[in-house]
Image (cartoon, grey):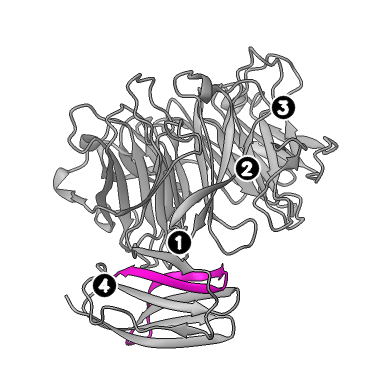
Amino acid sequence: MRKLFLTLFFLSLLIPSLLIAQTFPRTAEIRDPSQLEAGFGNVIAGVDFDGDGMPEIYACNTNFVDRPYEVVPRIYKFEWNPITSTWDSVWGATAPVPKQNTWPALTWGDIDKDGKPEIYWGPVNFIDTDPNPARVLVYEYVGDGSDNMGVDDGFGSWLPNASTSIVTADNFNLRPFKFEIADIDGDGDDELIFCDRAGTWHVGVLSVDDIPDNGGGLETWTVEYSGESDPNLSTIGACYDFVVIDNTIALIGGNGSISLISYENGGWVSTPVQTGVMNNNSSFKGSVVVDFGNGSIGVVVGSWLSSKVYLVEKEDTSDALVAFEIADFAPYAVRLNGAAVGDLDGDGLPDMVFGSRYMAGNAAKTPIFRLEYQGGDNTSPASYQMSVIDSAYWNNNGDMDVIVVANVDGDTEDEVLYTQGYSRGNPDDSFMPLIVLDLQHTPVSVEKENDIVPAQFYLDQNFPNPFNPSTEIKFGITQAANVDLRIYDVLGKEVAVLINNEFMSAGSYNVKFDASKLASGNYIYKMTAGANTVSKKMQLLK
């Protein structure tokens, strides 16, 4: 009997008849304020650090082709504006390092447990301009209700609260490109785990005692584990991926080898490198932990070599890993880069999403793939449905290797965010935004008609009614309040969120609602504003 330890999905040669087209609506295209970026190097989404009820997205740039504006590391905060139905840039910072390379790391947590979340950013520096650059920059939420992160320098810019170069030696080629935060050693405090693509450390674990509010540099960083001198990692080659499950790091080498590093009995224990588990397939930022909902937890990994999908299990009696091939995407992508997991349709089962590299001559251009687990035996290909959910329209030979699945609109389903993380140096690149895909998207816009304070609170009957497929709902509030407006079917099931408990000023508003995703029938729209709650009926006729 085998104990499920981890799940690795690698992608190569799919049976074409099993792949379906399932286009997701593009609900947003997010550009940086300068309108210069040809994509983003990494993304955090679906968070609300400032607690204002509006979703946030953080994105950092990357150096694609040594353009001057890309060499300077920058990070941006975007926040949803329900009035204009746009993602507004509300904060940004430039890293205090002279230069950067490709594939920056980015994650978030609250390591010092002060209730103020931190961003952990690794802008992958060129060591020829700084002999010992910062490999980790930490920006903590200010905590004053504003959008700001970090330390105000007094000149309109924001500096990191903390940083570390990790190593003390100058001119040391160390390039962390992926961060994870977890309490891997079970001591009650989170650690920062990273993977090194330079092939010197392979993997490292850092801890920090505190994140100072003033950025005074008084924090203490400790290297808990380094793979640099671990003999069990000497043959793993360059590494471009890892996953963390409980107390174990699964390190995936560029040559397809795998090593397990665990914290056991007060110390770190690594296993000898295992080869041939997945026919020596490797991964590039393609791994995520997946809960299959049947008692098994695993990891999704998109292979950048073979495009095959495997389920990997660990034997009960040994550290040996065994792989089961469950899917194949090779005819549709040169390589799969990047992966994420979530629930895109609200069915309670995980959906895995993979990016890919542009394939010349492919009509689909650069596909974004979905692998939907449908229940049952997760070692069987019959338990999965493969589909293409979008195709990048930029014919730019890029890698869609930045993939995020998160809830950014407050409904019951997750959204897919993707962009180009690396352009492959094509001088004809089109500038590419961060794209948001939403299977269950309910198109809606909220406009403030005027600032005249109405004599009393009101919620008008929608017009037209009956309608197909669009209608308008007007309301007015006499004072600033949190406003919530939702659509329900006749059984009381929520089917759309038009305003998600947003703080709105006094005045009159017009909500435009597109119900093209809903079936014909009677619905109820319910609005709450402060102490006022009103419900009305509407009818959709198609």
User: Distance of mark 3 from mark 4, alpha carbons?
Assistant: 53 Å
Q: In this view, does 295 lie to the left or right of 437?
A: right
The magenta stretch is 489-514
Of marks 1 and 4, which one's residue comes earlier in the chain? 1
User: Distance of mark 3 from mark 1, alpha carbons?
Assistant: 37 Å
**Quadrant position of residue 195:** top right
- Give the structural element (helix, strand or loop) at label 4: loop
Q: Can residue 236 be seen from the camera position used here?
A: no
Of marks 3 and 4, which one's residue comes earlier in the chain? 3
Label 1 Cα crowd, 10 Å radius (few <14 / some 14-19 / many 20+):
many
Image spot of residue 239 (x, y percent): 51, 28
Q: Which residue is drawn at 35% across and 84% down?
A: 461
- Give the structural element (helix, strand or loop) at label 2: strand
What label sits on residue 409 in the rendered view? 1
Three-letter code for the amino acid on which mark 1 is drawn: Asp
Image spot of residue 98 (x, y percent): 65, 20
* Depth check, front residue: 257 or 436: 436
Does the stretch in magenta take in 501?
yes
User: Distance of mark 2 from mark 3, alpha carbons?
Assistant: 24 Å
Q: Which of marks 2 and 3 is in front?
A: 3
- Give the structural element (helix, strand or loop) at label 3: loop
Q: In this view, does 354 lie to the left or right of 112?
A: left
What label sits on residue 518 in the rendered view? 4
User: Distance of mark 2 from mark 1, alpha carbons?
Assistant: 37 Å
